[in-house]
Image (tube, helix red, strand yellow):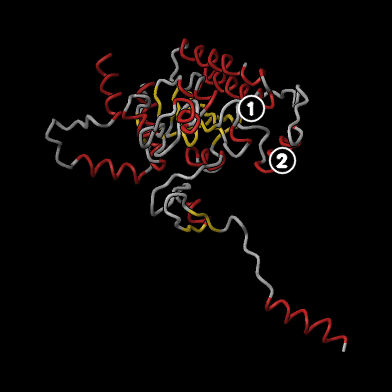
Amino acid sequence: MNWINNVVRPKIQGMWRKRETPENLWVTCPETGEMVFHRDLESNQFVIPGSGYHMRMGTAARLRTLFGDGGYTELPVPDVVADPLKFRDERRYTERLRDARSKTGFQDAIKVAQGDLRGIHITVAVQDFAFMGGSLGMAAGEAVIVAADAAREKRTPLILFAASGGARMQEGILSLMQMPRTTVAVERLKEAGLPYIVVLTHPTTGGVTASYAMLGDVHIAEPGALIGFAGPRVIEQTIREQLPDGFQRSEYLLEHGMVDMVVHRHKVPDTLARLCAVFTKTRISRPADDEADDQAADVAPAQADGGADNDNPVENVETRAEAAD
């Protein structure tokens, strides 16, 4: 009867056992509750197809949208002391760092790279919220400085994708020191006459907003991104007033002049390329499909106001640049 116990019974039990499904196989839209297959979401740059909601996007995916697979060179960031304050709350800071590095595969929250975007050489710094909330610590501060210095050395535009909850509390005053340090690095870049473009993603808050994230020559925001210093709940509890609908969201900031444009994630690479072309006075190289679209647009009827789209911030930048020349 051993064959019944060893073969038949396990098969019968397996038929009734609940099958385990990977947790990340399906993703739920926070706005509509729509279920999206993770592979479909990834192929759509982590934008929910139905609602258009922009989910958080990792560093590797960000770089891939700009440069393709492996079309960039990652720049090294100097090592810093891992836990200078020997900080501990519910867990040791060193344990949190180890878990974050294991989860993301990164040493810290910001990765720096250089590559060609539509034929224009650029320097990019990408902040990843998955690494301890994208918090600004000593390593992240060093990364921003490395990015600014590399852009000055190679005479390239610097593009920064911001995503952070603020300064890293486990590093105390050492994390707050990164705010003036990164500000100085950005100012040195501007003194060199090089463009600094910031893409504000969800969320960008705290000390990051109070320093390098709001110092750009042009600020682009993704739709629906939360952008501010203190969060809306903290503000409401402090002033004891009801905040307006959409307060601190990218569309609200655009309406009140805090950002220059709100751009869908699918259009961010082209928008960045056009801005870099304006600032560097360089022609951009575009894929054949894009050139065909441009030719089709050229034969379309001109607009009633003379053909210029005054609502297009990039074209407005181009017009101002030509006028300056």
| Residue 76 drawn at (x, y percent) | 65, 27
Q: Quarter of the image containing the N terminus?
A: bottom right
**Which quarter of the figure has residue 60?**
top right
| Residue named by callout 1 | 168
In this rendered view, identify the residue nearer to me: 308 or 280: 308
Instruction: Spot the residue most to the left.
Output: 304
Residue 187 appears in the figure: yes
Amino acid found under the numbered disc labelled 1: Arg
Seen in the image, is 228 located left or right of residue 277? right
Give the spatial CA distance, label 2 vs label 1. Answer: 16 Å
Image quadrant holding the C terminus, namely top left
Crowd around label 1: few <14 · some 14–19 · many ≥20 (10 Å):
many
* Residue under pointer 2: 99
- The part of the image, by quadrant, that contains residue 144 is top right
Q: Kindly state the secondary structure of the residue where label 1 is placed.
A: loop
Residue type at mark 2?
Asp
